Amino acid sequence: MIEMKDVYKKYPNGVIASNGISVKINKGEFVYVVGPSGAGKSTFIKLMYREERATSGSIIVNNTDVTALRDQKVPLLRRQLGVVFQDFKLLPRLTVYENIAFALEVIEQQPTIVKEKVMHVIAKVGLAKKAQHFPHELSGGEQQRVAIARAIVNKPAVVIADEPTGNLDPDTAWGIMDIFHEINQDGTTIVMATHNKDIVNSLRRRVIAIDGGEIVRDEYGGDYGYES
């Protein structure tokens, strides 16, 4: 599903954020990406959906060679993926329904299909009664649920999440993790960068630890492994 081979990423300021990383993530896996601040976690995540371009090496995501992809083809790659951010990135002037529908409208889905898919995922994340609310009328947890619904509305093979519980209180974060667990149970591959030690230690999955731009640990059923 995802494979990196000898991937390097060097920024213009000389920082090496990915130092020869090689890793394979199989279909249906749930993977935590952990490590201290500045370790290279976000770069690792961004390389997968071509927010950052590798300096060298090979990255295959869902049978697409991301490193060889021309810039104009990047939107096609991202339509196969769901990406969830820490700060939600919702469109403030659109309702919950419209924010989610937008992800389908840009790929020119028929209106009847859009409505069916959007209402299905809104119900899945528990926001059926708030479909016509605007983002500012929602709590942080509700906004993140909308962001997740938007990410999964087109049934992507892979969901990439960058600190999705970072701005949420503990109780809300657990509710968000329940949704990710359900998505994974449906067969979607999840790759999640996180600093949430309690979640990683309680919901044991594969843990990839990154430090200094290198994978220093890759453990199935692992723990967080760092002091909080």
Image: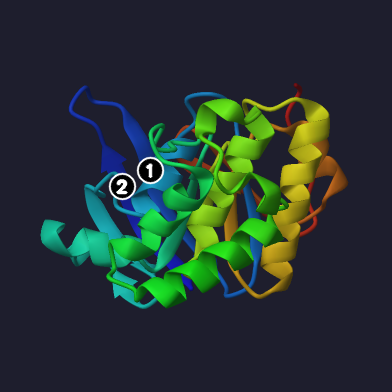
The location of residue 79, given as percent across then percent down, is 35, 65
| Sequence-first disc among 1 and 2 | 2
Picture residue at 72% right of the left edge, 45% below the top: 176
Can you tell which quarter of the image residue 167 is in? top right
Between residue 119 and residue 191, name the one nearer to us: 119
Q: How is colour applied across the structure in the image?
A: rainbow
Q: Residues within 10 Å of mark 2 (few under 14, many from 20)?
A: many
- Quick check: marks 1 and 2 in contact, CB under 8 Å? yes
Can you tell which quarter of the image residue 223 is in? top right
Query: As displayed, is residue 228 above or below residue 186?
Result: above
Picture residue at 59% right of the left edge, 28% below the top: 137
Query: Tag 1: residue type?
Result: Asn
How many dots with numbers?
2
The residue beneath circle 1 is 19
Element carrying mark 1 = strand
Horizontally, is 149 left or right of 201 in the view? left
Between residue 124 and residue 173, name the one nearer to us: 124
Residue 8, disc: 2
The location of residue 170, given as percent across then percent down, is 80, 29
The location of residue 207, given as percent across then percent down, is 68, 51
